[in-house]
Amino acid sequence: MKFAVLGTGGVGGYFGAKLAASGNDVTFIARGAHLDAIRSNGLKVISGGGDMLVKPARATADPTEIGPVDCVLLGVKLWDLDQAARACKSLVAGDGVAGGGFVVPLQNGVDALKRCAAELGAGKVVGGIAYIAAVIAEPGVIRHGGAMARLAFGEADGLSSPRVQGLLKACKAAGIDAEIPADILVAQWRKFVLLASISGLTSLARQPIGVLATDPDLRAGLKLAIAEAVAVGRAAGVDLPGDAADATLATIDRLPAEMKTSMQQDLERGNRLELPWLSGAVSRMGRELKVPTPTHDLIHAALQPYAGGAKR
């Protein structure tokens, strides 16, 4: 398959490198020193599952140079999503696999599919989820932490399609742990419940996940945050299972104790935060749906001074 990776950060860089290493035609879209390093030295991935070096690596800052592709993996941060989706128009203009190129947004939160569909049309977007902890360690180098590296994707209507089956086949051939869940919306909300809760509390406490899971006071707060997010999802009409809260906590207990969320790492580096789309989104949707969310309200208020990236 022919791929474009728009946003060659930890997520896009890792999965794009896997696809390129298995023989797919992959072009990485990046900028600045990261782009220069990829062009000069290739894209390197440092991972406990095996290091990779894609060299030469096809890379550009301009999506219009690439031409139509089969699939775009969209890995930008949430604040860049709308602009990035618009930049995908030339990439999905051709016939692609099974009748048309398509975009798979891999952002956190639960509104990426809707936002991309508003820019490109619903028929050009497939819902996606990335489960991975990876960052740009230095220009041209992606560091993957832990063993978790999985993709999930599916049509918004829950039906199978040749294009998602084709993407699944390409991922499997590349050694990527990938699946097509029965309901991509439910799967996205299950990740959102987990991520909004642990991102907010690890950032607020400035502690890794293991401390959240074992400190009695923080664990109690974690349970409250999870329960609030589940309640909001159900009020929004998402068919979350009855054990969603317990299953989320059990998943957190299996995560590496030393693991830090991407939002906590952004906070430590003084970078912009995805707070408005995580705890901020739980809080906002809670108000709209008349569901109390006091834990996420507090997380959002306490982290808001840092949301723009100011070191305060």
Image (spheres, rainbow, N blue to C red):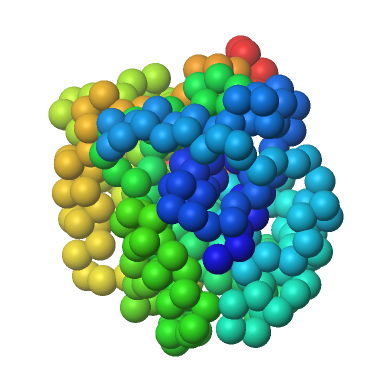
- In the rendered structure, the answer to whether residue 99 lies left or right of residue 192 reads right
Q: Quadrant of the N terminus?
A: bottom right
73 vs 312: above or below? below
84 relative to 260 in the view: left or right: right
Query: Percent position (x, y) of residue 234?
Result: 39, 70
Residue 115 vs residue 74, the one in the foreground: 74
Quadrant of the rendered image containing residue 36: top right
In the rendered image, the vertical position of residue 7 relative to residue 111, given as above or below: above
> Is residue 250 toward the left or the right of residue 159 in the image?
left
The quadrant of the picture occupied by the C terminus is top right
Q: Position of residue 252 (x, y in %)?
A: 23, 43
- What residue is drawn where x is 62% and y is 13%? 311
Q: Is residue 231 visible?
A: no
Q: Residue at x 39, y 20 (%)?
A: 206
* On screen, residue 90 above or below 270: below
81 or 25: which is nearer to us? 25
Task: Look at 52% across and 57% down and name the residue there.
Answer: 24
Q: Residue at x 42, y 35 (%)?
A: 52
Residue 219, horizontal then vertical, whole percent = 22, 35
Please tell me whether residue 110 is drawn above or below residue 164 in the rendered image.
Answer: above
